[in-house]
Amino acid sequence: MFNNKPRTVQFLRFCAVGSGNTAVDFATFYLLTLGGAPALFAQVLSYSAGVANSYWLNRKWTFRVARKANALEVAKFILVNGVSLLISSGLLFILRDMSHLDLWLSKLAATGGGMVVNFMGSRLWVFIEDQNTRSELS
């Protein structure tokens, strides 16, 4: 991936958008767990806090989709984010509750796992223009 400049720039933009969303995610997670919310409940709410912003910024800036947004694209985006949420929540549960790893190390690792799934799903399925664009990006 890193020998392809446009794809590298796209990934770096995705990471920049993700960094902002992650800041919202971690702040929300921190406040919820500080207030006594269970970690998995806090994970779902904190992850959801950045999804709408993520859609708009990634669509316009990261993947530069020219066509109008439509219900199918939004549904795909929600599905990819749902799968990412399930993976990150599963990782959080395994690392924190089963392996007894520190809460913040568990959260960091879970976030990284979800990010990889989210980027690949967004790039290869949600924000793809058409079949010709798909072959150019592969």
Image (cartoon, helix red, strand yellow):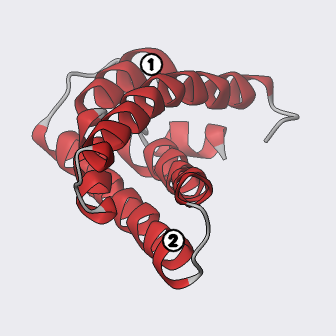
Give the mark nearer the N terminus: 1 vs 2: 1
Q: Quadrant of residue 109?
A: bottom right
Horizontal and vertical percent position of residue 62: 50, 22
**Residue flagged by tag 2: what amino acid is it?**
Arg
The disc placed on residue 113 is none
Frontmost residue, 120 versus 42: 42
Q: Is residue 65 visible?
A: no
> In the displayed structure, does residue 39 sit left or right of residue 10?
left
**Residue flagged by tag 1: what amino acid is it?**
Arg
Tell me the residue that label 1 is attached to: 64
Residue depicted at x 41% and y 29%: 21
Label 2 Cα neighbours within 10 Å, binned few <14 / some 14-19 / many ≥20: some
Where is the N terminus found, in terms of image quarters? top right
Q: Disc 1, disc 2: CB below 8 Å?
A: no
User: What is the total number of numbered labels drawn onto the structure image?
Assistant: 2
Horizontal and vertical percent position of residue 84: 40, 58
Frontmost residue, 70 versus 74: 74
Horizontal and vertical percent position of residue 7: 69, 31
Outermost residue to the bottom: 98
Frontmost residue, 117 versus 59: 117
Helix, strand or loop under label 1: loop
Residue depicted at x 50% and y 31%: 18
Q: Tell which tag, 1 or 2, sits nearer the viewer.
A: 2
Tell me the residue that label 2 is attached to: 96
Residue depicted at x 20% and y 41%: 74
Outermost residue to the right: 3
Horizontal and vertical percent position of residue 6: 71, 23
Helix, strand or loop under label 2: helix
Residue depicted at x 61% and y 45%: 135
